[in-house]
Image (spheres, rainbow, N blue to C red):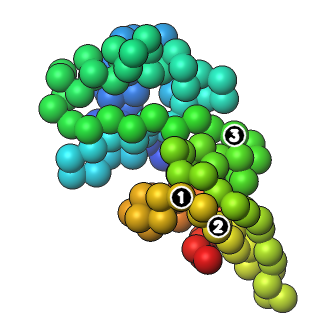
């Protein structure tokens, strides 16, 4: 069963600010020490980023935090592709163990370091949206 997403007050405030600034529809927000990751609705990444990254730059100035935008997709493979962008992937697939546990496998062609650095965040999002709690990089 996929857990329901619960947002705290701080996340809701950041989402409201970002939606007002950009006009994009935000689905989720994860706050880390020096950064905030916004997950925007499918098709809203361009609106969220703004011309020449204007919306991101403005929000980074206001909040003094690094901002990352990820475009949501109902398809977990497409979502993972979006999350690891700009890294190019050779292969992404889902396998299921005999006990029913689902595992996402990623095989990057470029930027292995970038992919490795985003694995923890990827696991968090996969569990939140798709009930998948394991990701393996080949």
Instruction: Report which residue position mark 1 lands on.
Output: 110
Whether 45 is drawn above or below 86: the answer is above
Asked whether the viewer can see residue 112, the reply is: yes
Task: Residue 134: give its label.
Answer: none
Q: Secondary structure at mark 2?
A: strand
Residue 129 horizontal/vertical position (percent): 63, 52
Q: Secondary structure at mark 1?
A: loop
Instruction: Report which residue position mark 2 lands on.
Output: 106
Q: Residue at x 74, y 79 (%)?
A: 101
Residue 38 horizontal/vertical position (percent): 44, 36
Asked whether 33 or 69 is in front, the reply is 69
Say which label, 1 or 3, has the lower sequence index.
Answer: 3
Q: Residue at x 53, y 45 (%)?
A: 85
3D distance between C-alphas at marks 1 and 3? 22 Å
Q: Residue at x 33, y 29 (%)?
A: 14
Q: Residue at x 84, y 88 (%)?
A: 98
**Quadrant the C terminus occupies:** bottom right
Task: Residue 73: give its label.
Answer: 3
Which corner quadrant of the image does residue 3 belong to?
bottom right
Callout 2 crowding tier (Cα within 10 Å): few <14, some 14–19, many ≥20? many
Asked whether the viewer can see residue 120, the reply is: no
Asked whether 39 or 108 is in front, the reply is 108
């Amino acid at each position: 069963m996929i857990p329901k997403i619960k947002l705290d007050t701080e996340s809701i405030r950041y989402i409201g600010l970002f939606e007002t600034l950009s006009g994009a529809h935000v689905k989720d927000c994860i706050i880390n020490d020096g950064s905030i990751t916004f997950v925007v609705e499918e098709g809203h990444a361009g609106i969220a980023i703004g011309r020449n990254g204007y919306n991101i730059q403005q929000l980074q100035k206001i909040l003094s935090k690094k901002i990352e935008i990820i475009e949501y997709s109902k398809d977990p493979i497409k979502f993972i592709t979006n999350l690891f962008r700009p890294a190019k992937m050779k292969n992404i697939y889902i396998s299921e163990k005999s006990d029913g546990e689902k595992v996402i496998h990623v095989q990057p062609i470029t930027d292995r370091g970038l992919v490795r650095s985003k694995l923890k965040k990827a696991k968090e999002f996969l569990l939140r949206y798709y009930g998948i709690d394991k990701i393996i990089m080949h």
